[in-house]
Image: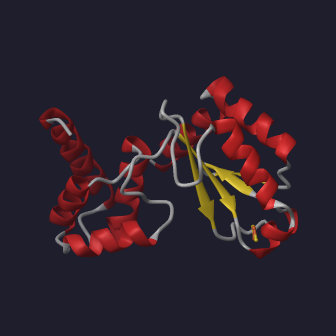
Amino acid sequence: MLVTDRQRLREDIAVWVARFGARRSSLIPVLQEIQAKYHQISDHAMQVVADHLDIHPVEVYSVVTFYAFLNEGYHGKFVIRLCRTVSCDMAGKSRVARQLENDLGIAFGQSTKDGKFSLEWASCIGMCDQGPALLVNDQVFPAVTPEKVHDILQLCRKSFGPLAVHQANHREARQ
Ligand code: FES
């Protein structure tokens, strides 16, 4: 990371800490902001957050590695998380998974080279009666079939659009 990038990251974190408060309970909201803007939470970011909130960096690291929605490594703009818990598994998640991997040319745990898509597994996302279910960022898609995978990816590609706007609005509403 370049010095200017680090500087910008530090400034952003200072703004988010000021917004949420320099206390332990701000840890997850601040980490979510870092994730949303930088698509990853680097070691440096964890250190800066720890300094601001006056907590040990190991504690920040534990939170980042515990929550599936926070990531140390780079994540694409669209993170697709397919539920692999039992109901979705029985409803055909494997066929959906294969279609996603074929269409994107990556395996689960990877991101596309253009930085637009990441594939991740998720545990139950509360749509067990409508499986297989997946999330694209924070938007739920129930009853996904291999055919629907194509439509979902098209929706993302077309716009970087409806979903990106949805996310931006969501972030603005929280500000
Ligand atoms: S088992 Fe997949 S959403 Fe609950």
Residue 149 picture location, percent across and down:
78, 42
| Residue at the image point whose x is 30% and y is 69% from the top | 61
In-image side of 73 versus 127 (left or right): left
Near-viewer residue (97 or 144): 97
Which x, y percent locates residue 167?
56, 41
Q: Is residue 157 left or right of residue 36?
A: right
What is the count of numbered marks? 0
Give the residue displayed 17% in from the left and 35% down from the top.
2
Q: Quadrant of the N terminus?
A: top left
The answer to whether residue 155 shows anywhere in this view is: yes
Residue 165 on image: x %, y %:
59, 33
- Regarding ligand 1, which quadrant of the image does it lie in? bottom right
Q: In the rendered image of this protein, does residue 154 appear above or below residue 167?
A: above
Q: Decide: is 82 above or below 38.
A: below
Seen from the viewer's position, the closer of residues 53 and 100 is 100
Residue at the limit of the structure toward the top, as seen here: 158
Residue 174 picture location, percent across and down = 48, 50
Q: Which residue is found at the position 70% from the left and 63% from the top?
A: 83
In this rendering, position of residue 37 left or right of residue 111: left
Task: Please tell me in which quadrant of the rendered image residue 25 appears.
Answer: bottom left
Q: Is residue 74 left or right of residue 174?
A: left
The colour scheme used to paint the residues is secondary structure
The structure residue drawn at horizontal position 38% and vertical position 52%, both measured from the top left corner, is 73
**Camera sees residue 128:** no
